[in-house]
Image (cartoon, rainbow, N blue to C red):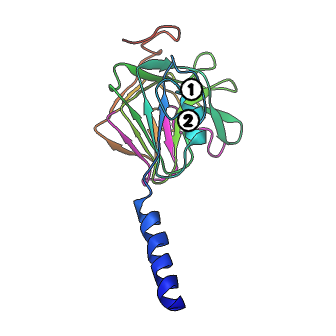
Amino acid sequence: MKLILRGIALILVSSAALCTQAAELFVSPAGQSVPPYASWSDAATTIQDAIDAASAGDVVWVTNGFYATGGKVTAGDLTNRVALDKAVTVQSVNGPLVTVIQGAWDPATNGPLAIRCAWVTNGALLQGFTLQGGATRTVGTGVANGGGVFCTSTGATVANCLILSNAAASGGGAYQATLNNCLIITSIRPLVPQHQLVM
């Protein structure tokens, strides 16, 4: 009888584990920034805050906005505006024309004050953004590549993105990434002023 009860308990625990669903987190400039960012009213105001609160497999939804604050260092001393440092999906609601991740130049292009737009790890997906005005250091392992987006390998995916006006010592727009349905454009400066919200 004890073996039967243990077997039933094991089946119930296994079934509960299989039914676990990915969490959804939300980002909006109008959010109240209340962890765990589980609704639009409690949404994080920076994309990085929501990523930091997420677990592998979760989805971070980002509504229309010009995201030019927040960030995270992943290597050396270079800040990334967003760092997908776990296997999450970061997805815009309405696409790249209205959802911008803004990096920073120093002040011409690369240098110590530069900020890369995005850093993406294996198994993560960044989808539906404009990545613009990002830059890197001029030299250094992991800090001189991919001003728009740096991926740790081709196992990291960027999809349906506009990658505009970024600079790096190598791979100004993107470095070591799997790009699906993306457009990379180089110009001498960011196409949208840093204070302007694209609508």
Badge 1 density bin: few <14, some 14–19, many ≥20, Cα 10 Å:
many
In the depicted structure, whether residue 171 falls above or below residue 22? above
Majority secondary structure of magenta residues: loop
The numbered mark at residue 50 is 2
Q: Residue at x 60, y 38 (%)?
A: 144
The residue tagged with tag 2: helix, strand or loop? helix
Q: Position of residue 113 (x, y in %)?
A: 68, 23
Side of 197 relative to 115 (left or right): left
Q: Amino acid at mark 2?
A: Ala
Pick the residue in front: 105 or 60.
60
The numbered mark at residue 46 is 1
Instruction: Give the magenta range.
Output: 137-160
Residue 106 visible in the picture: yes
Q: Marks 2 and 1, how far apart in space?
A: 7 Å
Side of 105 relative to 188 (left or right): right
Query: Is residue 145 shown in magenta?
Result: yes
Q: Where's the C terminus, which quadrant?
A: top left
Residue 53, quarter of the rendered image: top right
Q: Amino acid at mark 1?
A: Thr
The reply to whether callout 2 and callout 1 are in contact (CB within 8 Å) is: yes
Query: Is residue 25 shown in magenta?
Result: no
Q: Residue at x 48, y 9 (%)?
A: 193
